[in-house]
Image (spheres, grey):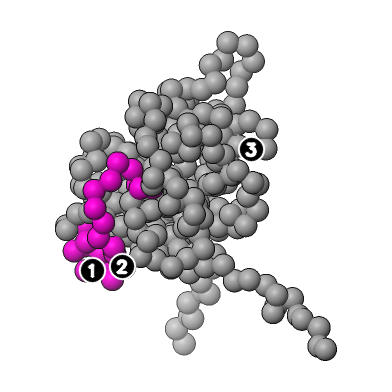
Amino acid sequence: MASTTAAQTHTVRRRIAVIPCRWAASRFPGKPLARLGDKPLLWHVHQRCLEAKRLDGVVVATDDERIEDACHQLGIKCLRTGEHHTGTDRVAESAEHLSADAYINVQGDEPFIDPAAIDAVSEALDHMAPGTLAVNAYTELNDAGAVLDHNVVKVVLGTGSNALMFSRQPIPYPRGDRPTYLRQLGLYGFTAKALSLFRHLPQGPLERAEGIEMLRLIEHGHGVRMLSVTDQGVAVDTPEDLERAEALLRSRLRTRQSSSSSNSPPSALPS
């Protein structure tokens, strides 16, 4: 009998990125369609997903007709959902219509999210410990202003890199040693089973108080594995953040144009 090759035994796991977008954000209504450069914010997030190598599809999920229409004009696949408390609840509804082994929730306010970070979360889903239902990316905070900013969600970790707590406050409190502050990114990975469970769990008092959806899993005793990734972008929570994102986009475009010019061959001299 012929031996089974590694290629034959390897199971291909299907991964889909879902970008949840809603119009009625309290801090920035209409944010998904706010212009960054010459394109809406959601377009930039979609592009980052297209650049990832470990995804089998990307879709925007929204309950708003204006966002749906914009996606159609941009050639972006879009699912219409009902109203939900959180983006992950919206992703969970979308998963019922999208066949996959796992789903990556890429928040629609992360226009500079690193495609490699998306791939890292996708890969980490293959190696979750028993009792862990999700993978959440994080990065170290080096800016004191960001540590104090309530729009920036902080996380503290336990052994095994599982999340102990998320908060908009600076945690942990620096009473003794000076702590390292970690920022939770809007980048989560779930199995289909985990998303179904998430959707049917009630919101707890911590989630309602902080407005941080991943607290739902922790409050109900489920593990959230935190994954360190590289992030050098700007999350857009407010109009002021959009101004900073615009400046960063212009800077990156200038750097790219300068690099392209320096690598171009010299023009031929006229004869």
Q: Which residue is mark 2?
A: 76
Q: Residues within 10 Å of mark 3 (few under 14, many from 20)?
A: some
Image spot of residue 87 (x, y percent) = 35, 47
Give the quadrant of residue 254.
Answer: bottom left
Q: Relative to residue 249, is residue 228 drawn left or right? A: right
User: Where does the N terminus fall, quadrant-wise?
Assistant: bottom right
Which is more N-terminal, label 1 or label 3? Answer: 1
Residue closest to the eye, 205 or 236 = 205
Q: Are marks 1 and 2 in contact (CB under 8 Å)?
A: yes
Taking the magenta stretch, the answer to whether it contains residue 221 is no
> What residue would you read off at disc 1?
72
Residue displayed at 51% across by 71% down: 264
Query: Which stretch is magenta?
Result: 67-89
Which of the pair 148/214 is nearer the observer? 214
Q: Are marks 3 and 1 in contact (CB under 8 Å)?
A: no
- Residue 222 x, y percent position in the rendering: 54, 38
Q: Nearer the viewer, mark 3 or mark 2?
A: 3
Tell me the kind of residue under disc 3: Ser
Q: Is residue 70 left or right of residue 99?
A: left
Q: Is residue 87 on the magenta stretch?
A: yes
Instruction: Give left or right: position of 79 versus 115.
Output: left
- Report whether residue 46 is seen: no
Q: Which residue is mark 3?
A: 161
Secondary structure category for the residue under label 1 = helix
Q: Amino acid at mark 1?
A: His
Disc on res. 168: none
What residue is drawn where x is 25% and y is 60%? 80
CA gap, disc 3 and disc 2 = 35 Å
Residue nearer the viewer, 146 or 90: 90
Q: Amino acid at mark 2?
A: Ile
Return the disc, 3 or 2, that comes first in the chain's sequence: 2
Q: Cα distance, mark 3 to mark 1?
A: 40 Å
